[in-house]
Image (spheres, grey):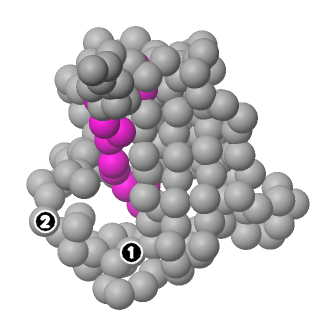
């Protein structure tokens, strides 16, 4: 009998050759008055860019979804609108990270820096130490937002179980 291995039982997956990496970066039009540009880098534990990763963002409250492959410098970007706050949680996007060496994707969140009061009341952020919260809140940069994702090491992004 021949057994086929599932993706979670193999090394990889190999995103640069085995996955349609077409980006769906723009969740809304860049001319929309609510449009925000979010850019960042996907970095490994040594701070080296991960050039063949894939970042997906989701918002159940805004009904929005996007995907961005990473470039050679590990960069990714999205044009999006801030989703509404709901259920006692601050406005945020769910973020999924797919990269080489991961047997399962990693899940984190992206919060907005101009939502101080909502972020302080958010139950997920309230359950974390301040230094960990800082890894989940984007930073203002050049009229947009910066959100770097560090897989390990110093200032490692907080990842959640799924």
Q: Residue at x 50, y 26 (%)?
A: 53
Please tell me whether the stretch drawn in magenta is mainly helix, strand or loop.
Answer: loop
Q: Marks 2 and 1, how far apart in space?
A: 14 Å
Residue under the point 25% across and 33% down = 156
Looking at the image, can residue 144 be seen?
Answer: no
Q: Secondary structure at mark 2?
A: loop
Q: Does residue 7 lie above or below 80 as drawn?
A: above
> Is residue 79 in view from this perspective?
yes
Q: Position of residue 58 (x, y in %)?
A: 52, 60
The reply to whether discs 2 and 1 touch (Cβ–Cβ < 8 Å) is: no
> SS class of the residue under badge 1?
loop
Mark 2, residue position = 127
Magenta-colored span = 99-113
Quarter where residue 124 is shown: bottom left
Verify whether residue 105 appears in magenta. yes
Labelled disc at residue 90: 1
Q: Outermost residue, bottom direction?
A: 87
Q: Residues within 10 Å of mark 2 (few under 14, many from 20)?
A: few
- Position of 160 relative to 98 (above/below): below
The x, y position of residue 83, in whole percent, is: 56, 73
- Whichever of labels 2 and 1 marks the residue nearer the N terminus, that label is 1
At horizontal 70% and vertical 45% (from top left) the residue drawn is 25
Residue farthest front in this picture: 1
Q: Is residue 83 left or right of residue 135?
A: right
Above or below 22: residue 33: below
The residue positioned 52% from the left and 67% from the top of the image is 59
């Amino acid at each position: 009998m021949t057994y086929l291995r599932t993706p979670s039982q193999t090394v990889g997956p190999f995103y640069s050759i085995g996955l349609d990496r077409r980006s769906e970066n723009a969740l809304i039009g860049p001319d929309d008055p609510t449009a925000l540009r979010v850019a960042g880098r996907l970095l490994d534990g040594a701070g080296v860019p991960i050039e063949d990763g894939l970042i997906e963002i989701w918002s159940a409250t805004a009904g929005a979804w996007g995907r961005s492959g990473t470039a050679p410098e590990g960069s990714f970007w999205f044009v999006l609108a801030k989703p509404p706050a709901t259920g006692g949680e601050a406005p945020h996007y769910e973020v999924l990270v797919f990269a080489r060496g991961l047997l399962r994707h990693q899940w984190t969140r992206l919060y907005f820096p101009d939502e101080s009061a909502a972020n302080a009341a958010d139950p997920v952020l309230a359950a974390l130490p301040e230094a960990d919260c800082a890894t989940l809140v984007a930073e203002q940069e050049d009229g947009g937002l910066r959100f770097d994702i560090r897989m390990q090491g110093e200032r490692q992004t907080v990842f959640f179980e799924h």
